[in-house]
Image (cartoon, helix red, strand yellow):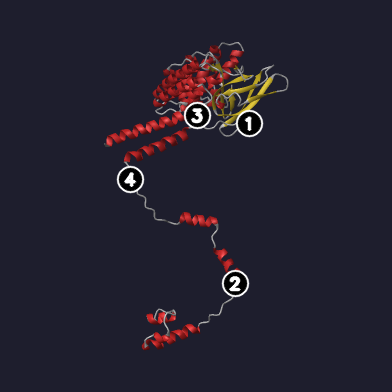
C-alpha cells in the first residue's frame, strides 16, 4: 500500500516525522497519505461465533485422515543423496550372507502337523492315521516317530475303556514314516501290526506308508 | 588385489553359510541330546553339509537315539554310519541319472543300503521309478521288504515287476503289508514275495483285458484290416 510513497512520507506514516518536517515539495503527498490512512475504518470488528464454527467445519472437511496423511508422506517424492564408500568385496560378502540366510530359511523343514488339529480326512497333503496298541496294564502310551521329532509326549494314546486297547489318530503327511510306541514313558515297543526296520541302534522301528489313498502298514 | 578380494568373499560366504547351518543344528539338538553328542553330531553334520549331503536325517537320528535313551557313543556311531550311507546313496542316485537328488530320495537310498541293497540295486530302483512313481517311495518300499526278510534281489524283482506291470504307487506301498500278511499265514517272506510277484504279472485292479503297461506296444489286432 505504501510502496509508491517517498521514503520520507513512509517515515511520516510510521510517525517518525511530522508533516512540518517534510520538505515542502513532499508535504502535499504526505498530507494525502495521512488522509488515506486516516480514512480507514479502525473500529474493532466482532465476528459471530457461527462464522468460527463454519470456518472450522470447512477446515475439518478438507483435513486429510491419518491414513491419507501417512500415504501422502510415503508417496511424496524426496531428494535423497546417499554417498557410500565401500570396497566391492564387502558388497559381495553381504549379498552372499543374505543369500545364505534366505537359503537357510527356505530350506528349513516344514512344521509338523499338530496331532488332532487336522480336519477329518486330513488336508490335501496329509492323511488321518489311526494308531492302535494293545497294552494291558500300561499307565500311559504315546507314539513317537519321524513325524513328531521322536517326542515321547507329543502324541499320547487314549485308553479305550478298560480293555487294554490304546488308540489315537494323527494327521500324517504323505510319505513313509518310522515310529514306535512308548509305554509308560520308557519302554519302546514296535507296532505288532506293521512292518519294522532296523533303527541303527540295535532295535526296530515300525513303518507306515501314507498315500493320498490312505495309510499302508 | 582383486583375487584376494574374491577369495576373501568366498571364504566369508561359505563360513557364514556354515555358521548359520551350525546354529540351526545346535538349536534343534539343544536340550535333546547331551553336550558331547551335540558337539560330535555338529561335526558330522558340518562334514556332510560340506559334501552336499542332506543333514536333516542326521539330526533326526541323533534326536531319535537320545529319545530312546541310547548311550551317547552309540548315537554318534549311528549318526556317523548314516552319514556314510547317505554319501553312498547320493552316488548311487546320481549314477541313475539324477544330477541333483532330493533329500527324501537320498534318505530312501540310505534306507535301502541299510536293508542290504547294493549301490547298483539302488540305482536300478531309482531308474525304474518313472512317473507316477516317486523314487523315494520305491526305495523305501524296497527297504521295508528287505527288512521284512525278503532277499534284496527278490525285493528288487518284485518292485520292478510291479512297476512295469502298471501298478500304482499306492499298490506299491501296500506290498510290505501284503508280505507281512503272507508271513502271518505261515509263508516265509521269500514265499510271500514270490506269490506277490506272480500276482503282479497279472492285470492291475480295474484294468480291461486289453490293457498294456505304459511303454509297451499293444498287440496287433488280427481282425483289423
Marks 2 and 3 on same chain: no
- Quickly name the residue at label 3: B27
Q: Is residue B84 left or right of residue A162?
A: left
* Residue in the picture at 47% in, 86% down: A35
Residue A124 lies, in percent from the top left, at 57, 34
Q: Is residue A183 above or below residue A74?
A: above
C-alpha gap between disc 2 and disc 4:
59 Å
- SS class, disc 1: loop
Q: Are marks 3 and 4 on the same chain?
A: no
Marked residue chain, label 4: A
Q: What is the distance, in whole Å, between disc 3 and disc 4 at their CAs? A: 37 Å
Callout 3: chain: B
Residue B101, percent across and down? 43, 27
The disc, 1 or 4, on the residue closer to the chain's N-terminal end is: 4
Q: Quadrant of residue A162?
A: top right
- Quarter of the figure with residue A101: top left
Per the model, the C-alpha gap separating discs 1 and 4 is: 56 Å
Residue named by callout 2: A51
Could you give the CA–CA distance between mark 2 and mark 3, rounded to whole angstroms?
69 Å
Give the residue pinned by disc 4. Answer: A85
Separation of marks 2 and 1 at Cα, in angstroms: 67 Å
The reply to whether the C-beta atoms of the residues labelled 1 and 4 are less than 8 Å apart is no
- Residue B84 placement (x, y as % from top left): 43, 19
Label 2 secondary element: helix
Amino acid at each position: 500500500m505504501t510502496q509508491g510513497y517517498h521514503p520520507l512520507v513512509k517515515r511520516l506514516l510510521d510517525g517518525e516525522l511530522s508533516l512540518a518536517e517534510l520538505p515542502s515539495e513532499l508535504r502535499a503527498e504526505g498530507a494525502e497519505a495521512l488522509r488515506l490512512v486516516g480514512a480507514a475504518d479502525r473500529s474493532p470488528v466482532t465476528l459471530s461465533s457461527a462464522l468460527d464454527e463454519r470456518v472450522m467445519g470447512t477446515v475439518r472437511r478438507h483435513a486429510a485422515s491419518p491414513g491419507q496423511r501417512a500415504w501422502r508422506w510415503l508417496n511424496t517424492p524426496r531428494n535423497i543423496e546417499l554417498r557410500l564408500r565401500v570396497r566391492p568385496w564387502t558388497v559381495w560378502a553381504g549379498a552372499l550372507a543374505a543369500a545364505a540366510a534366505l537359503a537357510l530359511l527356505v530350506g528349513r523343514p516344514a512344521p509338523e502337523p499338530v496331532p488332532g488339529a487336522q480336519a477329518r480326512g486330513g488336508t490335501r497333503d496329509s492323511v488321518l492315521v489311526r494308531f492302535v496298541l494293545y497294552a494291558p496294564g500300561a499307565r500311559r502310551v504315546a507314539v513317537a516317530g519321524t513325524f513328531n521329532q521322536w517326542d515321547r509326549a507329543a502324541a499320547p494314546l487314549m485308553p479305550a475303556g478298560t480293555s487294554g486297547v490304546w488308540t489315537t489318530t494323527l494327521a500324517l503327511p504323505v510319505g513313509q514314516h518310522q515310529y514306535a510306541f512308548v509305554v509308560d514313558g520308557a519302554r519302546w515297543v514296535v507296532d505288532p501290526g506293521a512292518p519294522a526296520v532296523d533303527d541303527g541302534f540295535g532295535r526296530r522301528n515300525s513303518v507306515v506308508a501314507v498315500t493320498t489313498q490312505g495309510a499302508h502298514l | 588385489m582383486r583375487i584376494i578380494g574374491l577369495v576373501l568373499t568366498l571364504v566369508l560366504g561359505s563360513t557364514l553359510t556354515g555358521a548359520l547351518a551350525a546354529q540351526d543344528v545346535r538349536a534343534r539338538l539343544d536340550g535333546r541330546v547331551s553336550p558331547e553328542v551335540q558337539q560330535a553330531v555338529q561335526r558330522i553334520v558340518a562334514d556332510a553339509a560340506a559334501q552336499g549331503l542332506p543333514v536333516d536325517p542326521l539330526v533326526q537320528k541323533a534326536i531319535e537315539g537320545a529319545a530312546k535313551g541310547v548311550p551317547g557313543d552309540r548315537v554318534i556311531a549311528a549318526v556317523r554310519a548314516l552319514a556314510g550311507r547317505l554319501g553312498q546313496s547320493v552316488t548311487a542316485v546320481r549314477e541313475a541319472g539324477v544330477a541333483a537328488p532330493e533329500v527324501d530320495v537320498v534318505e530312501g537310498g540310505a534306507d535301502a543300503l541299510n536293508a542290504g541293497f547294493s549301490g547298483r540295486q539302488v540305482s536300478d530302483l531309482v531308474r525304474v521309478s518313472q512317473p507316477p512313481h516317486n523314487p523315494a517311495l520305491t526305495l523305501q518300499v524296497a527297504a521295508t521288504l528287505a527288512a521284512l526278510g525278503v532277499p534284496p534281489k527278490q525285493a528288487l524283482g518284485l518292485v520292478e515287476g510291479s512297476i512295469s506291470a502298471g501298478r500304482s504307487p499306492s499298490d506299491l506301498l501296500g506290498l510290505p503289508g501284503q508280505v507281512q500278511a503272507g508271513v502271518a499265514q505261515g509263508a516265509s517272506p521269500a514265499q510271500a514275495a514270490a506269490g506277490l510277484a506272480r500276482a503282479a504279472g497279472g492285470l492291475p485292479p480295474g484294468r480291461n483285458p486289453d490293457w498294456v503297461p505304459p511303454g509297451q506296444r499293444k498287440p496287433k489286432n488280427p481282425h483289423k484290416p
